[in-house]
Amino acid sequence: MTDKVFEKSITKQFEFDEEVASVFDDMLNRSVPFYKEMQRLTINFALNYLENNDRVYDLGCSTASTLIELSKHSSKKLNLIGIDNSPAMLARAANKCKAFGVEVKLLNEDLHNIEYPEAKLIISNYTLQFIRPLQREKLVKKIYDNLKPGGVFIFSEKVISSDKVLGKQYIDEYYEFKKTQGYSEYEIAQKREALENVLIPYTDEENKKMILDAGFDHCETLFKWVNFATFIAIKK
Ligand SMILES: C[S@@+](CC[C@H](N)C(=O)[O-])C[C@H]1O[C@@H](n2cnc3c(N)ncnc32)[C@H](O)[C@@H]1O
Ligand SMILES: O=C(O)C(=O)C[C@]1(C(=O)O)C=C[C@@H](O)C=C1
């Protein structure tokens, strides 16, 4: 289904509710530049670290597309666990997993409330940005603590520039991208307002600092398009 959520005037802040979930795959594909390429890289790099029976968690799994793709591309038997606190997203995830014949344990939980034990790989694409900054640092520490030695954390985020002028150019470039995807200026403005104080992006440097402060040995950028970045963090 085509995303038309912001064609009408907004009445509330952005939420992962039934309306958003019903068009979410289209929304992501048209709102995140190179989404598919970012997902392909997430999976290819993840596969370098995975062995039979490893546990893989996707935090903020939404409709489970990443876990389904990972399963399709892996020759190993993996324990796939998707966590999300949106029942509307998880209902779509369950349908898609069934349709693709992929076994995924789907947990309707807040990321703050549960542990991710024995994790070899934790993925979290475009989800930390929705966690309040103080909670975000704690969550990343928990991610580090739950990973086995040799484990990896791959995550993607919308990012900002620490340079004001460049930051404005980032936003202009991103809105041009949205227009090429068929979003009107009205839809772009409405979504921007709905996301205000809900999606809180960090700079590249802040993301890397948060990761290293949590204890990770290494963190680098795997992919970047202007204001969207994918990072890999390694626990030795
Ligand atoms: C932008 S979407 C993630 C997209 C997905 N990772 C992908 O690549 O297809 C963010 C997801 O995080 C979930 N989420 C946000 N805050 C959460 C929390 N505190 N606990 C659990 N899930 C959360 C939302 O419900 C939403 O499905
Ligand atoms: O449309 C935007 O402005 C975005 O930031 C895209 C974005 C994201 O990066 O998470 C925002 C909300 C939806 O979850 C899908 C994509």
Image (cartoon, grey):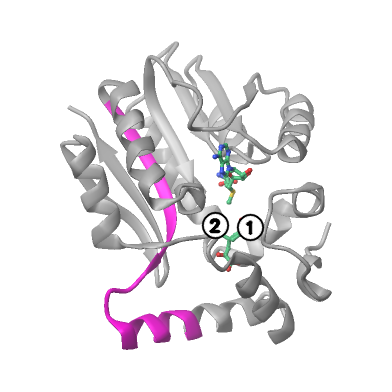
**Towards the viewer: 1 or 47:** 1
73 displayed left or right of 215:
right
The stretch in magenta equals 151-172
- The one nearer the camera, 39 or 234, is 234
Amino acid at the residue labelled 2: Tyr
Residue at left offset 55%, top offset 59%: 198
Residue 97's spot in the image, x, y percent? 71, 28
Q: Is residue 193 above or below residue 154?
A: below
- Ligand 1 resides in the quarter of the picture at top right
Please report contact status of discs 1 and 2: CB closer than 8 Å, yes or no. Answer: yes
Quarter-of-image position of residue 159: bottom left
Q: Secondary structure at mark 1?
A: helix
Give the mark, 1 or 2, whose residue is nearer the N terminus: 1
What residue did someone put label 2 on?
35
Which residue is at a point 66% across and 80% down the rendered structure image? 189
Return the mark for residue 182: none
Q: Residue furthest top?
A: 53
**Is residue 190 one of those drawn in magenta?**
no
The residue singled out by tag 1 in the image is 28
In the picture provided, is 165 more to the left or to the right than 62?
Answer: left
Crowdedness near tag 2: few (<14), some (14–19) or many (≥20) residues, C-alpha within 10 Å: some
**Residue 86 showing in the rendered view:** yes
Q: Quadrant for the N terminus, please.
A: bottom right
Question: What residue do we see at 33% from left, 43% from top?
Answer: 137
- Label 1 beta carbon within 8 A of ligand 2: yes
Q: Amino acid at mark 1?
A: Leu
Q: Quadrant of residue 162?
A: bottom left
Q: CA distance from mark 1 to mark 2?
A: 7 Å
Query: Does label 2 point to a residue whose CB lies under 8 Å from ligand 1?
Result: yes
- Element type at mark 2: helix
Q: Position of residue 174 (x, y in %)?
A: 51, 77
List x then y, in percent, for residue 18.
81, 47
